């Protein structure tokens, strides 16, 4: 059974707003359900390890409710692995789940950068959705170049950040940061599904893109591994 590594944020404070944040539940849940249904084993890692906080949970959504009541999944989210625990050679792909918390603790995590760089250069799948590509911003390859340089990718747009009045709350704007690293960034209108597949790099713009990222990752792994 192929193993996948889902990365979720440890961060729970939305800047100085007094509001809570975390990982986005549907951006975890939709790919998780699809990939588990296709026979993958899935582990969870977070920058700090241990329990993580879900954000955006919709109890009216049948799949989300089912996953919230899934004892195996909830046990993993209550005790996520630490980056130091991870052997990248044991995983077929890494997937960065979105959520606003990622903007505080993904980009500068050196251990996650190392894991991602190695997996990418080994031809493993590297996927991310919405704010998840924050984990790709500072990843460098063995030649010193940024992983995202000259890559087609999608991520939460600056326009979407402004539309929810969080552009001044974020520590940086994701679209702008990726473009500054040389990424070939694409975006669709607000909240519209948009994914980019550039060989083994698979990225999506927003929550509407999460399931398609999971499907594209499965397609890549089916073809190559």
Image (cartoon, rainbow, N blue to C red):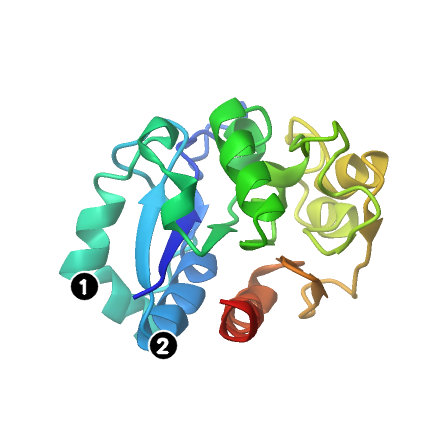
Judge the density around disc 1: few (<14), some (14-19), many (≥20) Cα neighbours within 10 Å.
Answer: few
Viewer-side residue, 59 vs 70: 70
- Tell whether 64 sits left or right of 75: right
- Residue at 58%, 71% in the rendered image: 216
Q: CA distance from mark 1 to mark 2?
A: 20 Å
Residue located farthest toward the left when viewing the structure as drawn: 71
Q: Inspect this view and state whether residue 60 appears.
A: no
- Residue at 18%, 63% in the rendered image: 69
Secondary structure beneath label 1: loop
Residue at mark 1 = 69
Q: Nearer the viewer, mark 1 or mark 2?
A: 2
Tell me, for residue 1, which label it has, or none.
Answer: none
Viewer-side residue, 200 vs 106: 200
Residue at mark 2 = 38
Judge the density around disc 2: few (<14), some (14-19), many (≥20) Cα neighbours within 10 Å.
Answer: few
How many numbered marks, from 0 up?
Answer: 2
Q: Quadrant of the N terminus?
A: bottom left
- Residue at 69%, 62% in the rendered image: 199
Secondary structure beneath label 2: loop
Rendering coords of residue 224 (x, y %): 55, 69
- Mark 1 or mark 2, earlier in chain: 2
Rendering coords of residue 90 (x, y %): 36, 48
21 is higher (above) or lower (below) than 47? below
- Tell whether 197 sits left or right of 25: right
- Residue at 28%, 39% in the rendered image: 80
Rendering coords of residue 22 (x, y %): 42, 40
Q: Inspect this view and state whether residue 188 appears.
A: yes
112 is higher (above) or lower (below) than 29? above
- Tell whether 100 sits left or right of 154: left
85 is higher (above) or lower (below) than 32? above
């Amino acid at each position: 059974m192929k193993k996948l590594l889902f990365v979720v944020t440890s961060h729970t404070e939305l800047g100085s707003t007094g509001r809570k944040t975390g990982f986005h539940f549907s951006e975890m849940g939709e790919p998780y359900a699809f990939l588990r249904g296709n026979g993958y084993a899935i582990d969870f890692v977070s920058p700090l390890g241990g329990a993580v906080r879900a954000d955006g949970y919709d109890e009216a959504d049948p799949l989300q409710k089912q996953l919230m009541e899934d004892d195996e999944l909830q046990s993993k989210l209550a005790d996520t692995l630490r980056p130091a625990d991870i052997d990248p050679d044991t995983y077929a792909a890494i997937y960065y789940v979105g959520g606003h918390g990622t903007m505080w603790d993904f980009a500068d995590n050196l251990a996650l950068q190392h894991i991602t760089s190695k997996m990418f250069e080994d031809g493993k799948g590297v996927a991310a959705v919405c704010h998840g590509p924050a984990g790709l911003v500072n990843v460098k390859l063995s030649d010193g170049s940024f992983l995202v340089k000259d890559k087609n990718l999608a991520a939460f747009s600056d326009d979407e950040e402004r539309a929810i009045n969080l552009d001044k709350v974020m520590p940086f704007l994701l679209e702008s940061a990726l473009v500054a690293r040389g990424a070939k960034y694409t975006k669709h209108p607000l909240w519209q599904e948009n994914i980019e597949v550039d060989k083994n790099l698979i990225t999506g713009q927003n929550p509407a893109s999460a399931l398609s990222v999971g499907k594209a990752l499965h397609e890549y792994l089916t073809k190559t591994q």
